[in-house]
Amino acid sequence: MIEPKARGARNRTEIVNATIEILEEVNFSTLTIEAVAARSGAGKATLYRWWKRKSDIVFDAFMAKSETLFEFDPKKSIDENFIQQLLTLTEVLKSGVGRSMMTVITEEKDIAAEFLTAYLTPRRAETKKMLQAGIDKGEIRDDLDFDVVLDMLYGPIYFNFILCNRIPDQTYIEKLVRQVMR
Amino acid sequence: MIEPKARGARNRTEIVNATIEILEEVNFSTLTIEAVAARSGAGKATLYRWWKRKSDIVFDAFMAKSETLFEFDPKKSIDENFIQQLLTLTEVLKSGVGRSMMTVITEEKDIAAEFLTAYLTPRRAETKKMLQAGIDKGEIRDDLDFDVVLDMLYGPIYFNFILCNRIPDQTYIEKLVRQVMR
Amino acid sequence: MIEPKARGARNRTEIVNATIEILEEVNFSTLTIEAVAARSGAGKATLYRWWKRKSDIVFDAFMAKSETLFEFDPKKSIDENFIQQLLTLTEVLKSGVGRSMMTVITEEKDIAAEFLTAYLTPRRAETKKMLQAGIDKGEIRDDLDFDVVLDMLYGPIYFNFILCNRIPDQTYIEKLVRQVMR
Amino acid sequence: MIEPKARGARNRTEIVNATIEILEEVNFSTLTIEAVAARSGAGKATLYRWWKRKSDIVFDAFMAKSETLFEFDPKKSIDENFIQQLLTLTEVLKSGVGRSMMTVITEEKDIAAEFLTAYLTPRRAETKKMLQAGIDKGEIRDDLDFDVVLDMLYGPIYFNFILCNRIPDQTYIEKLVRQVMR
DNA sequence: TCATAATCGAGACGGTACGTCCCGTCTTCCT
DNA sequence: AGGAAGACGGGACGTACCGTCTCGATTATGA
């Protein structure tokens, strides 16, 4: 027997989806709670019951969008793994919620912190795993400062995306990974 | 002969300064045009006469804040020059306007584009000059993709600043430059 | 059982009363919706929800002020009844809302029309009743054009009030009624 | 040789005419000084040099419009003279400036007073002359209160015009004069 | 005849109120 | 009982005019 989702839970997903939809059309500033309520068919009060601020909804929406965590595939080469992960990241950033998440991060320090622990760190952990595997295999030299290397991989992606308004493509990412890996 | 600044010019600076001040206290969303008008002693209409959107004022404020362009000093080593430039960048980002500029960039594509041409590109040009100087001196290998290298330098700075909410310090920057330069 | 007044109704009266108050201090042009909102403790949006224009509020305020309809008293003489009714009219006109109502009427034709049907006509009907009673009793000749006679009674009141800025007193009204009645 | 009107005088007429024109299109509230300036080709400052308030311009415009004073014609009958004068009055009231003048009078007591002395009183004097002529000729009984009779003539005109939004036509005026004159 | 002053148009400016939109809260009514 | 619907007080929006002000360009004159 299929457990029917509780009223509350059903509502939450509808609201979050409405948010994702709207953010494909307008940017974060222009997003209004009233629009989310209207599109999702929920009452405003319901929104405020679960989220304190607009940014919190966006955070949840972003997390929902990027639910599936990229996972290290030991069968592929290290470089291929890196490339795949950065492509996945690019994909998420491209969406309306992705971009809005960036906006939120620049404005609300506490959400930035939550983004760091709940989104960034897990992915970084995965990347670290890859790096370590590379070192173990001897494919990569072992005198690296992990954090700096990771920044050199992630940084340019966000940098291009946010500041240069340029979506990094496969070619760019390959060049980047090769250059970082030497 | 001292060029007597026009009424308009004086006002513009006062408005821009008021904006910079306020942005030390609140973030971009919370910044209101009415507050800027009030603090600068200007009428709202005056603001709208010169700027179409709040973001445009912030852009001008940011440009005013970071007026002085870092300049390549050939007497110092290449690395030192890099380090100095990235520190300068960090300094600007740290300010309220700096952070707000990041917010604006994530929201308004056209301002992002203007930021690219009016702020980023000149600085990148300076950095490219340094890179070329390094290659000429033989300090740096000559098979690099310039753009990717520059992204590897700038990217991590913005990345740490925006996403990790961490202000890169001298140590970090030195490590970064060394790693990139090999 | 006391019908508990709806939230809306309570607000309406408060707003209308605030309007009446303010109009004792300033004239119609100087009356601002913001002032009404402030004095009544309502939000501007609430005002606009119920009334489209400033003039509409003033109309309602005027109607509230002159709620009690003068009623023909068959025990008194015809003349006394006339005098009493014109005095009542004068009383209303004297107030701030009264004067403002005159302003509105000169400006907005549709409100003038509403004023005619909702305020003037009922009072005229009452006056006609009196006239008819007078004719029936033989106190008044029966070859009169009712409308013209009524205009000769009301007209001078408004005329003195609006154009001569003179408030008709008992003496004047008595003279007027006597002259009209012959 | 035609004396070329001074710059100032020429401007004044142009401004006043512009006002009259605009008042055919919009009502007093909606009339803006900027519009008058624009239409007349004058600078705003010029307007403020000669008139303190919008209402003052309207007053001048009204006086310009009704420059020609109706004059008592002893060859015609008393009644005909009355009828003619009231028709003239109606004509002026019908215009945009006329109606606006009424608005102004309800709002600004000092202008109302000026209207009384500069416009109303001269016309009343003329009417009084007619009344006196009638009495002298024995056409009219001699025990009248002049002021009340005049109010009974003028009052209904203004009353119908302003409050009933009805423009008194020849028939009405004839009936009125006959009724008042008995 | 031409400098010199007065006058004017144009419109920027600091303000105030407009009418609208959305906020976050709170009440009502329906299911 | 719980939620949608949406009224409410509040505050910022972007606009329109206010009345004051500076700026040139245009007259118009008297040295």
Image (cartoon, coloured by chain):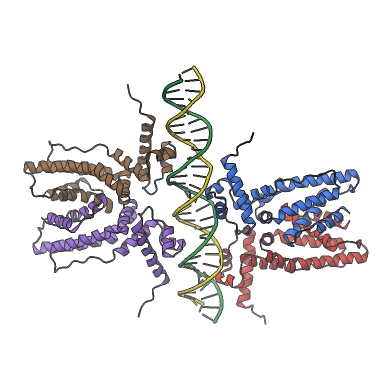
Chain colours: A red, B blue, C purple, D brown, E yellow, F green
Q: Nearer the viewer, residue C16 or A22?
A: C16
**Residue C128 visible in the snapshot:** no
D181 is higher (above) or lower (below) than B168: above
Total numbered circles: 0
Is D72 drawn above or below residue A2 in the view shown? above
Nearest the viewer among C36 and D23 is C36
- Whether residue D131 sits left or right of residue B72 in the image: it is left
Query: Vertically, is D44 above or below C103?
Result: above
A174 relative to D42 in the view: left or right: right
- Residue A107 x/y as whole percent: 66, 61
| Picture residue at 17% right of the left edge, 48% below the top | D150
Task: Single out the residue that lies furthest toward the left.
Answer: D138
Q: Quadrant of the C terminus of chain B?
A: bottom right
**Residue C96 percent across, percent down from the top left:** 32, 58
State the residue in front, A160 or A94: A160
A162 displayed left or right of C38: right
Instruction: Determine the residue positioned at 71% across, 56% down.
Output: B94
Question: Is residue C163 visible in the rendered structure shown here?
Answer: yes
Residue B57's spot in the image, x, y percent?
62, 50
- For the N terminus of chain B, the quadrant is top right
Q: Residue A123's image quarter?
A: bottom right
Q: Residue at 59% of width from left, 51% of height from top?
A: B53
Could you say where residue D79 lies in the image, as x and y percent from the top left?
Answer: 13, 43
